[in-house]
Amino acid sequence: MAIKKIAFVVDKLPYKGESSRLALTHCIASQTVEIHLEEDENVEPVLAFVGNGVLNCLRNQNAEAYGVSTMESHIKNALLTDIKVLICEEDVKRLGIAEENLIMDAEDFGADMTSQIVPFSEIMAEIESSVHLMYF
């Protein structure tokens, strides 16, 4: 089976812009392209948060002011659809974020997948093995 890996890399803050939300929406939607592929082809998205983009992965961020869903629900939906979610270890340390403050699972959504805190070198390996790079 031919796998077409697509890397979605987010390095933007989750505030004052649509970039982060669009990245997750496109990543989740990439799962639906199977209807346009040949019989033995498949898509494997990977979602990586780097730089200030790791702030998208913080738990309990409030988005009630405008009645929009939070990034937390988007990340949990990504995990629910079995998308590999990677969070850059170096940036988590640089920003002083404790693992318990990050969205690491979506058990409340019924997901089996969990986010992974990994070194940037592992994220680069995923990017290099991808046929397409979507940078947000």
Image (tube, rainbow, N blue to C red):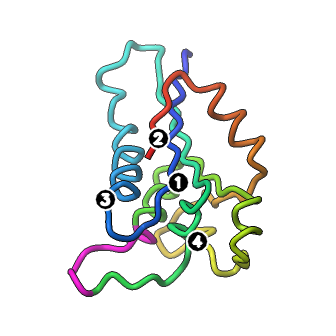
Tally of marks:
4
Say few, some or many: other residues with alpha carbon within 10 Å of mark 3 (under 14 / 14 to 19 / 20 or more).
few
Amino acid type of the residue that numbered disc 3 sits on in the rendered structure: Glu
Question: In the drawing, what numbered circle is on residue 22?
Answer: none
At a point 52% along the width and 33% down the height, the residue shown is 44
Which residue: 31% across, 59% down?
Answer: 18
Residue closer to the observer: 105 or 131: 131
Q: Are marks 1 and 2 in contact (CB under 8 Å)?
A: yes
Q: Is disc 4 in contact with disc 2, using a CB cutoff of under 8 Å? A: no
Q: Earlier in the sequence, mark 1 or mark 3?
A: 1
Q: Residue at x 55, y 69 (%)?
A: 55
Q: Residues within 10 Å of mark 4 (few under 14, many from 20)?
A: many
* Mark number displayed over residue 135: 2
Give the CA distance from mark 4 to mark 2. 21 Å
Which of pointers 4 and 2 lies earlier in the amino acid sequence? 4
Kindly identify which residue carries mark 1.
11
Q: Secondary structure at mark 3?
A: loop
Q: Amino acid at mark 2?
A: Tyr
Numbered tag placed on residue 103 in the rendering: 4
Q: Quadrant of residue 116?
A: bottom right
Viewer-side label of 4, 3? 3
Q: Secondary structure at mark 4?
A: loop
Q: Amino acid at mark 1?
A: Asp
For the point 78% across and 41% down, which residue is it?
121
Determine whether the residue tagged by mark 2 lies in a helix, strand or loop: strand
Residue that badge 3 annotates: 18
Q: Position of residue 136 (x, y in %)?
A: 43, 47
Tell whether position 66 is magenta: yes
Tags 1 and 4 touching, CB below 8 Å: no
